[in-house]
Amino acid sequence: MQCDERCYKGRWRVETMFRRLKDFCRIATRYDKLARNFLSAVSFANAVAFWR
């Protein structure tokens, strides 16, 4: 079975993003009731997680 390297790299990045997002309690438990607030919290957590 052949593996597309570019696709595999993209999948790795997505899996890493979700693993890093689980470190943020607010995201994992979803305290926000509004979808836009939750999306902004996810975006902020993502920026912080990848800044390190």
Image: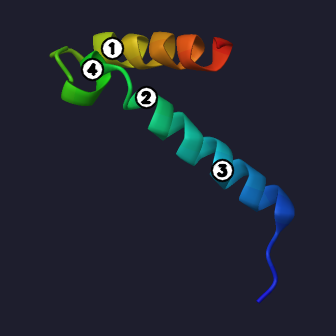
Disc 1 from disc 4: Cα separation: 18 Å
Report if the CB atoms under discs 3 and 4 are less than 8 Å apart: no
Rendered image: mark on residue 25? 4
Q: Earlier in the sequence, mark 2 or mark 1?
A: 2
Residue named by callout 3: 12
- SS state under label 2: helix
Disc 3 from disc 4: Cα separation: 22 Å
> Within 10 angstroms of label 1, few (less than 14), some, or many (20 or more) residues?
few
Disc 2 from disc 1: Cα separation: 17 Å
Q: Give the image quarter of residue 3.
A: bottom right
Residue named by callout 1: 36
- SS state under label 4: helix
Q: Nearer the viewer, mark 2 or mark 1?
A: 2
Looking at the rendered structure, the number of numbered marks drawn on it comes to 4
Q: Earlier in the sequence, mark 3 or mark 2?
A: 3
Q: Is residue 4 above or below residue 30?
A: below
Rendered image: mark on residue 21? 2
> Within 10 angstroms of label 3, few (less than 14), some, or many (20 or more) residues?
few
Q: Give the image quarter of residue 51.
A: top right
